[in-house]
Image: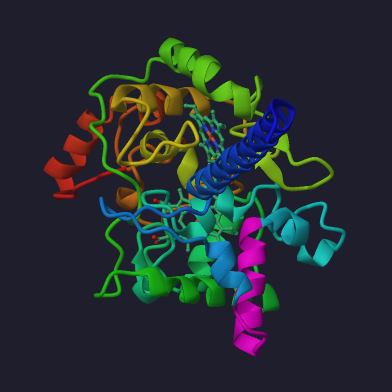
Amino acid sequence: MDKKDYTKQLKKIKSRTYFFCSIAILSIILLLFVIYGNFTNKNVFMEGSSFQLFTIDNYISSLDNSKTSLEIKYGFELFKNTPKYLGPQNGNEELAYAGNNLSCNNCHLFAGTKPYSAPLIGVVDRFPQFRGRENKMGTIEERINGCFERSMNGRMMPADSKEMKAFVSYLKWLDRFADKDGDYKHKGFVKIEIPNRPVDLVKGKHIFDNLCFACHGKQGQGLKIKNSLVYQYPPLWGDDSFNNGAGMTRVITAAQFIKANMPFGATYQVPILSDEEAYDVAGYISQQQRPQKINPEIDFPDLKRKPVSTPYPPYADDFSIIQHQMGPFQPIMEYYKQKYSMTKTK
Ligand code: HEC
Ligand code: HEC
C-alpha cells in the first residue's frame, strides 16, 4: 500500500467513524426525548414514593368497541374536552348543559387521576352519600350535576341522558386504579396549615403576577387551544369561569388545590408554593369578578353545614361576610366546634 492509498483509507475510516458517532448521538438524543416526553406527559401518574407510570390515553385507546367500552371512551372524551360537546358554543343548544368553556379535566387533573386534585378514583363507590349542601343522601349523578351548576356555571343534566351515563361509566372505569380496599388514599385535596390571619391581597397579587399570569393571562382570562373551544390554560375568573357557588371559589379549597397542583407541574410531594403563598394567591383569585350562582340563599337548607369559607350569606353565625371570604377562619371554626361540636375543615 503506498502512502496515497493509506491516507485515502484513513479518511474513509475517519468519515465512517464520524457517521456512526453522529447516528449514535442522534439516537441517544432521540431516546432522551422519548423518555423526557413520557415523564412530562400530562397523564403521568405518580403514586406514593414508588412511582408507577401510565398514560390514561393509552389505556383508553386500547379499549375494544363493545357498548360499555364505547361509553367509557365517550365519557373520557367529554371529561377532557367538555366545551366541545356540552359548552355554550357546542352548536347544539339542547346539549349546552355547561355555561362556561371549562373542562372537568381543568380541575380534576390528568383525566381525574392526579393525587389531591379531587381525583375521581373510587368515587362512584362512595355514592349514594350524605351531602351537607342539600342535607340529604345524594347520588353520583347529583354530585356530577353539582359541578355542572357551579364549577361549570350551567344546569343539571338528566340522569338518563347519554352524556351522564358516559360520565358515570368513565368514573366507574377509573375505579380500577383504587387501592385494594376500593378507596383511594390521595383523594380530595392536600391538607395545609391555614394561616390564622386574613388573606394578604397585596402578597396574593404579587404571587399571581410572578407565578401564574404567564399561563392564566394578565386578567386571569386563560388561553384557548388554537381553533378550539377547549382551554389550554383555563380562566381563573371572569365571565367564562366557575361561579361563586363552586368549591374552587372558597379560599380554603382553592389554596389546597393550588398547593399540590400549581404552578402547573407542582405535586403534593414536590409543591412549589408555601401554605401561606397558596392561601394568599387563592384569596386574591377569589376576590375577582366571576358569575354569580342563582338563588344562593337556598343553598344549604341546614346552614350549620355551610363551609366556613363560602363567600356569600346567609350564615348560621354572626361573623362578617368579609371574614367568611378572607379569613381568619380559625375563630369561625372554633365557634362551630364550641357551639355545635362540629369540626369544620373548609
Ligand atoms: C372549577 C373546577 C372544577 C371543575 C371544572 C369541575 N369540578 Fe368537579 N369538583 C371540584 C371541586 C373543588 C370538588 C370538591 C368539592 C368540595 O370539596 O366541596 C369537585 C368534586 C367533584 C366530584 C365529587 C368528588 C368526591 O370525591 O366526592 C365529582 C364526581 C366531580 N367533581 C365531577 C366533575 C365532573 C364530571 C366535571 C365536569 C363536568 C367537574 N367535576 C368539573 C371542582 C371542579
Ligand atoms: C405552566 C402553566 C401554568 C402556570 C404557571 C399556572 N397554571 Fe394553573 N393551570 C394550568 C393548567 C394547564 C390548568 C388546567 C389543567 C389541565 O387542564 O390539565 C390549570 C388549572 C388551574 C386552576 C383550576 C382551573 C380553573 O379554571 O380555575 C387553578 C385554580 C389554577 N390553575 C391556579 C393557578 C395559580 C394560582 C397559579 C400560580 C401560583 C397557576 N395556576 C399557575 C397551567 C398553569
- 319 within the magenta span: no
Residue reaching furthest front?
2
Q: Residue at x 22, y 31 (%)?
A: 330
User: Which colour style is shown?
Assistant: rainbow
Identified at 67% across, 85% down, the residue is 65
Residue situated furthest bottom in the rendering: 66
Q: Quadrant of residue 122?
A: bottom left
Q: Nearer the viewer, residue 48 or 171?
A: 48
- In the rendered image, residue 189, in percent from the top left (x then y), is placed at 35, 47
Q: Is residue 253 above or below residue 156?
A: above
Quarter of the C terminus within the rendering:
top left
Report the span colored magenta: 63-80
Question: How far across and how far down the image is residue 272, in percent?
Answer: 37, 28
Question: Magenta: predominant secondary structure element?
Answer: helix
Depth check: 313 or 263 in front?
A: 263
Is-magenta flag for residue 73? yes
The quarter of the picture where residue 256 lies is top left
Q: Position of residue 79 (x, y in %)?
A: 61, 61
Q: In the figure, is residue 257 to the left or right of 154?
A: left
Horizontal and vertical percent for residue 10? 65, 32
The answer to whether residue 87 is left or right of residue 293 is right
What residue do we see at 49% from left, 38% from top? Answer: 249
In the image, what residue occupies the spot 67% across and 31% down? 6
Placement of the N terminus among the 4 image quadrants:
top right
Task: State the residue in front, 22 or 204.
Answer: 22
Residue 335 higher or lower than 147, as above or below: above
Question: Image check: 6 left or right of 190?
Answer: right
Q: Height in image: 344 above or below 95?
A: above
